[in-house]
Image (cartoon, rainbow, N blue to C red):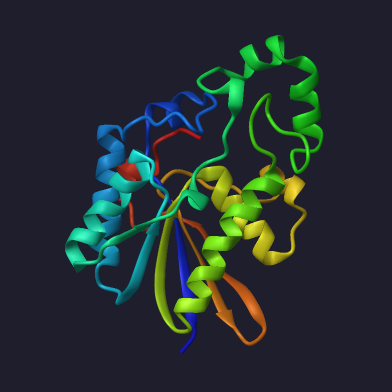
Amino acid sequence: MSLQIYFLRHGETEASQTGGYCGSIDPALTEAGTAMAEAFGQVYQKLPWEAVYVSPMQRTVATAKPLCQAVGCAMEQRDGLKEIDYGEWEGQTQAAVRDRYPEDYVRWLAEPAWNPPTGGETTVQIASRASLVIAEIEEKYRDGNVLVVSHKATIRIILCNLLGIDLGRYRHRIDMPVAAISVVRFDKYGPMLQRLGDRSHLPPELANREGT
């Protein structure tokens, strides 16, 4: 046996449909997003779960809820799993940010590891806070399955950090659609990516929905 962490991105929200910058603001799941959460819970309740760790945002809590109710597992909420804080860019479109903050925007595109959105977080800061949660899980659970419900950027950054991929390239190396699951196994050789961006638990009408 070995520890396996299942990283689940939350279900669809209006922001994931429109593509606006959404980190610290907290939209609810859409009707389709709720259906995605229910589909995940229905399929994955068959696995034995040691624990469920969740970002405290309402979209992640709502995504974890069906599974937790089905298996009788309490949520461990951790701030370290929150989405990137986009600072002054929150709620704005890419075009608006490019026009209003051109220098910060170019720097962030070129090297987000050390250059934050205006008033927001760098990739290095996100990796630092999220890695404390992963370390906690590794310390507590040597074997079994642990679910982590988080966000698009945060999960991609965690995976880059675990797999030795340049943190500044997280947007260009790993995709993470809504309600997708990625699995990392931890054994004597370190983290091994077993699945990436899997949405086979979703019915076709949900898996085929467009959105970021």
Tell me which residue sits at (66%, 26%) in the image.
Answer: 119
- Relative to 167, residue 182 above or below: below
Judge whether residue 195 can be spotted in this image.
no
Tell me which residue sits at (33%, 39%) in the image.
Answer: 58
Left or right of 112? Residue 180 is left
- The spot of residue 35 in percent (x, y) is 25, 44
Residue placed most toward the observer, 158 or 196: 158
- Relative to 136, residue 181 above or below: above
Tell me which residue sits at (53%, 48%) in the image.
Answer: 176
Judge whether residue 67 can be spotted in this image.
yes
Left or right of 48? Residue 84 is right
- The spot of residue 197 in percent (x, y) is 51, 55
Residue placed most toward the observer, 135 or 9: 135
- The spot of residue 48 in percent (x, y) is 29, 77
Quadrant location of residue 104?
A: top right
- Relative to 128, residue 49 above or below: below
Quadrant location of residue 165?
A: bottom right
